[in-house]
Image (cartoon, rainbow, N blue to C red):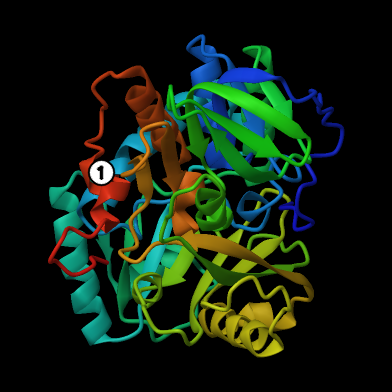
Amino acid sequence: MLADSGGALPAGYRLRRDELPSSADIVVIGAGLIGVTIAARLAAAGRDVCLLDRVGPAAGASSACEGNVLLSDKLPGPELDLALRSLALWRAASERVASAIELEHKGGLVLARDAGELESLRLVAVRQRGAGVEVHDVGPEELRELEPELAEGLAGGAFYPGDCQVQPMYAVAARVNDFLEAAGRLVTHAEVTGCERRRSSGAVSVVTSRGTVAVGSFVVNAAGPWSAEVAKRLDTSLPVTPRRGHVLVTEPVVDLIRHKVYEASYLGTIHATTADVSTSAVVESTKAGTVLLGSSREFVGFDRVIDRHVVAAIAAGAIRLFPRLSRVRLLRAYLGFRPATPDRLPIIGFDAADGTVLHATGHEGAGIGLAEATGELVEALVGGTVPVVDPTPFSPARFTVAPGSSARG
């Protein structure tokens, strides 16, 4: 069952809490899945790494999401390239920790309500196939073969066998274990409050609520939706904004939903720029038997009050797809904040103004799925090796403003 309490790792997990060291070669800020994956890879490569978090592992977005590892919601381009690489790495990891992280190769089914949506979905699928994604067109008759409980009257859809789901809290715990086994140092309840720079050398120390740690090489900002504030405290800037999302959890249900199922309109909500709330029906089950219902996206800062109107809209959308859900009890609703960027692409790379700071953030709702490839990319950038995926489209420099030009994104 997915946790929604924030910062609570799986029952029975014993977390070693280190004291803040006086120095470290690399400091990683943020112990969500992005941060712990980066820290684990760097520590395994022999780097002296200190991982900081103001609360603890999985205290933010990683504990308030659905654990998706998706190709279906990525349009051809840099993000899809990163997602394809990440999926390959997740599959490789599954040979070692599949049961521990509850990795399910369930596949994703995207639904079109009418002929217009179906035509648009088919065009997207053609482009995705050209980029290397396995996707199958599904007619209205085949929909109910894939999902017998689906409502009638849908125009068709597209099926993506590669779509997966993990239990994100377990994935974080597995990566924390990897990090600690590689002699990494995890310091919890250490909020970054600022930095100190030595003008003669350009070296930096990170100031936290638990003291100061001198940095030998790099600081990695992996603070998710709080990355903009962390960047500010590191004397730089980053255009990352929290985007709130609600998730509903039902009581356990037997044999209701087989795949991740969502409406084609979900793709539009990802790229919506309006400040108004946007919702689209997303439905999937977990290994615990509960059903997760989404989704919503809205820019309301860090407002933590659950909106009953959004909850009602999500529930209605799910029932529209699976009428049987109208007879299933809702156990709870929770919300999380996704790190959004102006162009909806992640930010991965060295700060445009400070070469000692590297950012790994802005994945919005795709952070779980893109974590593995992000960790690999950061490791390559830090080590000065050639990355598997071109880092250029993700560079923070794309948001800098050249003299006489207008801002991008």
Q: Residue at x 12, y 66 (%)?
A: 404
User: What residue is shown at x 23% (from left), y 22% (from top)?
Assistant: 386
Query: In the image, residue 269 lies at what x, y percent?
Result: 40, 76
Identify the element where label 1 is drawn. Answer: helix
Is residue 354 visible in the rendered image? The answer is yes
Work out whether residue 56 or residue 148 is closer to the camera in this orientation and state it: 56
Q: Is residue 178 visible?
A: no
Q: Residue at x 17, y 58 (%)?
A: 402
Q: Amino acid under label 1? A: Asp
- Residue toward you, 116 or 182: 182
Quadrant of the image for the C terminus? Answer: bottom left
Residue at 19% x, 43% y is: 132
Residue linked to disc 1: 81
Above or below residue 21? Residue 196 is: below
Count the marks: how many? 1
Query: Looking at the image, which is closer to me, 278 or 289?
Result: 278
x, y (%) of residue 133?
24, 47
Label 1 neighbour load within 10 Å: few <14, some 14-19, many 20+: many
For residue 118, side relative to residue 179 (left or right):
left
Q: From the viewer's perspective, is residue 196 above or below residue 384? A: below
Residue 222 coordinates in the image, percent (x, y): 52, 43
Residue 102 at x, y percent in the picture: 63, 39
Extreme residue in the top direction: 46
- Residue lying at the far bottom of the rendered structure: 309
Please, is residue 298 above or below residue 20 in the view?
A: below
Viewer-proximal residue, 96 or 408?
Answer: 408
Tell me: 249 left or right of 69: right
**Going by the image, does 257 lie left or right of 203?**
right
